[in-house]
Image (tube, rainbow, N blue to C red):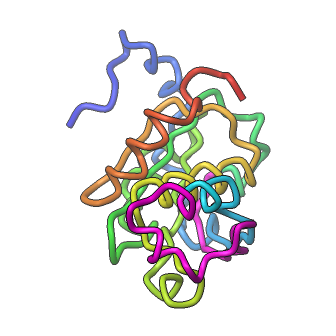
Amino acid sequence: MVLATKSSLWGPLFRTFSTKSPFSLTSIAKPVTFRTCSDIYPQLLATSPHSNLYKKTSLTGFDLTVNYADSALLSDPSDFDRTVVAVHGVYGYFTHFEALFKHFHGSRVRVIAPNMPDFSHTVKHGFWHSPTERGVFLKDFLLKLGVTKVDCLVSHSSGMSPAAEIWGRVCFFKNCL
């Protein structure tokens, strides 16, 4: 897989990349708590053919704490020219993207990867991991971090669904927030 060439738009960003600087994924990981799904549960309860699945949901969403890795935790977010968001599949963790973090470490590319919600939230909050719910989770997570524009979205396996939701329904790629 080729991420960029010197002649590409991303080329100038690699000029500051240094493989000599130390890197530890644990140094850029921490938990974050935020409210999610408040803008979709009223609609899902009213219009979904499977509305009985959402009986446990709160119309105001729910608070969720997830761990995430963010290369901006080591410096100021304004030091970055581009933002890459990485989304893992089911039964995954942000550690799946360690090579991506290492590749961009020392560059002006910010890499962010949340741990997606696990299935304990299905029982507790009625979060069914639909593409819409996972996409809204990802949107709410990014807004909590102050991210309003994403330059590259990387996903694997079932991480495609929330990535497609972000790309198709939310305007992170159009600077419209």
Q: Is residue 3 left or right of residue 64?
A: left
Write the start and end of the magenta stretch as one range.
44-71
Q: Which quadrant would the C terminus be assigned to in this image? A: top right
Residue 77 image offset from top left, x and y in percent: 75, 42
Please state which of residues 117 and 153 is positioned toward the viewer in this rendering: 117
- Figure check: 177 above or below 45: above
Q: Is residue 12 above or below residue 145?
A: above
In the rendered image, residue 150, in percent from the top left (x then y), is placed at 56, 34
Image location of residue 167, percent across then percent down = 45, 34
Q: Nearer the viewer, residue 127 or 96?
A: 127
Left or right of 108? Residue 115 is: left
Q: Nearer the viewer, residue 14 or 90?
A: 90
Up-down relation of residue 9 to residue 168 (above or below): above
- Residue at screen point 53% across, 47% down: 105
- Please indicate whether residue 69 sits to the left or right of residue 38 in the image: left
**Magenta residue check for 52:** yes
The residue depicted at 50 percent of the width and 35 percent of the height is: 169
Identity of the residue drawn at 67% across and 63% down: 36
* Quadrant location of the N terminus in the rendered image: top left
Q: Is residue 175 above or below residue 39?
A: above
